[in-house]
Amino acid sequence: MSHPTEISTTERESATFQLLQEGRETVKRELGKVIIGQHAVVDQILLALICGGHCLITGAPGLAKTLLVKSVAQIFRLKFQRIQFTPDLMPADITGTEILTETPEGRTLTFVKGPVFANIILADEINRTPPKTQAALLEAMQEHQVTAAGERHILTEPFFVLATQNPLEMEGTYPLPEAQLDRFLFNVLIDYLPEDDETTVVQQTTSRLSQPIVPVFSSEDVMAFQHLVSQVPVAEEVVRYAVRLTAASRPGNEGAPEFVEEWINWGAGTRAAQALVLGAKALALWNGRAHVTHQDIRQLAPPVFRHRILLNYRAEAEGATVEHVIQRLLEGVKP
């Protein structure tokens, strides 16, 4: 005999899946009003949102990174806060601070929330600020809370940090520490547009014509999508493939390819394998499937590994890049 709660849960998950499928094209169409091209970038950021993971966006200035994040917040009806990271930004400027206020009972310390208390945080140019302030985001990103004067303050759900950074070779940047990099589910790379797309951008941005973005989902929908992602089944052989692919990036690991020993100082950890599987679940749902394939894992390897593999001086001397290393891993480790 079936239990009513089981039927109710199944129906709710089915309705959530249907909602995601119906809204997918609408979301792309709305984002297309302000973001030209960059389809892979848009998909990866949306996948990170429905996974409940944080996202690092890397690209040169002027490639609409800020506009993209703000537009995503509008589509999902999420409270948006932008934090401009600068060399003089202090941790309290992000998390909040206690101030002395007058009350009928006398003077008391009151906690004033910082900009981190929102649904989507745009940490703009996060590598423009010193490591001390970068680290202020760690607790919020990992625990979804901040601590001030010994008291915990829970952040609003859903909570996402979408951080943009300029390439590290640019002047005035501070490399993010590995501990913080590992907190990001994906590292999304935004490159320059093809000539036709760039022409369209210039035409749109230099005219008075602008189309407002229409919200598609709500914060409750985002929470439902996250729950649905966790329910997607994954075959053990697919999980093992994600683990093998991750382990192959580690120098000193048994069976690691020769180029890994030569070029890599530090490979991807267990969080990378978790990110591969979680992201693949979201990708399967996004594409209308209720199961994960090996191809889903392979498709997400670049944004998952890009910020978790540290090359050595020999790789740099020979002109090898992280993208090249990831491609070699995908060619060498077959499903």
Image: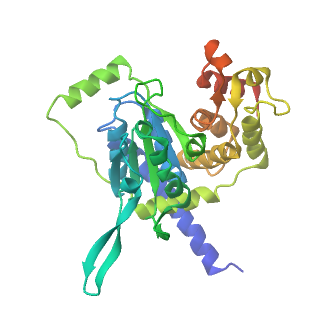
**Is 61 above or below relative to 76?**
above
Image coordinates of residue 132 in percent, x first then y, are 48, 46
Q: Is residue 218 visible?
A: no
Farthest top residue in view:
318
Name the residue rendered at 56%, 68% in the picture.
11
Looking at the picture, tell me which residue is in the foreground, 214 or 160.
160
Residue that appears at 46% across and 28% down: 167
* x and y percentages locating residue 95 in the rendered image: 41, 58
Give the quarter of the image for residue 246.
top right
Could you say which quadrant of the image residue 60 lies in? top left
Quadrant (top left/top right/bottom left/bottom right) for the C terminus: top right
Q: How is the image coloured?
A: rainbow
Residue at screen point 44% across, 52% down: 22
Q: Residue 276's image quarter?
A: top right
- The quarter in which the N terminus is drawn is bottom right
Q: Is residue 46 above or below residue 307?
A: below
Residue sitting farthest toward the right: 254
Where is residue 284 shown, x and y percent of the image? 59, 46
Using the image, determine if residue 160 lies above or below residue 9.
above
Residue visible at 58% across and 35% down in the picture: 307
> Is 318 situated left or right of 197 in this image?
right
Residue 96 visible in the displayed image: yes
Task: Specify whether 250 is left or right of 4.
Answer: right
Residue lying at the far left in this picture: please name it: 208
From the viewer's side, name the closer residue of 304 and 321: 321
**Nearer to us in this view, 334 or 247:** 247
x and y percent of residue 208 in the render?
14, 34
* Number of numbered tags placed on the structure image: 0
Give whichever of 288, 324 is nearer the camera: 324
